[in-house]
Image (cartoon, grey):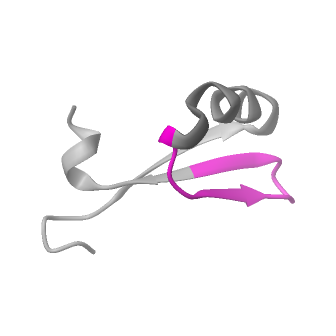
Amino acid sequence: MSARGPWCGRELPLGLGIDVLRHLGEETGAVIRDGFGERLYWLIPPSRDRE
């Protein structure tokens, strides 16, 4: 938990997530790859989730 509240998570299927990563480039933060479920997960700070 952040001092500003809980973080949010967003997930995408692997293929779509890779396309999003290419589009975002250096603007993306850390991404977690779930090799078992073939998904990508982004953790988004509370202040950015509301933008």
Q: What x and y, as percent, mark residue 25?
A: 61, 35
Q: What x and y, as percent, mark residue 11?
A: 58, 43
Q: Nearer the viewer, residue 26 or 41?
A: 26
Q: Nearer the viewer, residue 40 or 28?
A: 28
Q: What x and y, as percent, mark residue 36?
A: 86, 59
Q: Residue at x 23, y 72 (%)?
A: 2
Q: What x and y, as percent, mark residue 47?
A: 19, 49
Give the answer, above or below, for where 20 lies relative to 34.
above
Which residue appears farthest toward the right when viewing the image? 36
Give the answer, above or below, for where 40 lies relative to 50.
below
Is 50 on the left-hand or right-hand side of 22? left
Q: Is residue 49 magenta?
A: no
Q: Is residue 38 magenta?
A: yes
Q: Residue at x 70, y 30 (%)?
A: 22
**Which residues, given as a range, are shown in magenta?**
27-41
Image quadrant occupied by the C terminus: top left
Give the answer, above or below, for where 30 lies relative to 16.
below
Which residue appears farthest toward the front when viewing the image? 26
Image quadrant occupied by the N terminus: bottom left
Task: Give the mark count.
Answer: 0
Is 20 on the left-hand or right-hand side of 43? right
Q: Residue at x 28, y 41 (%)?
A: 49
Which residue appears farthest toward the left when viewing the image? 4
Is 34 on the left-hand or right-hand side of 32? right
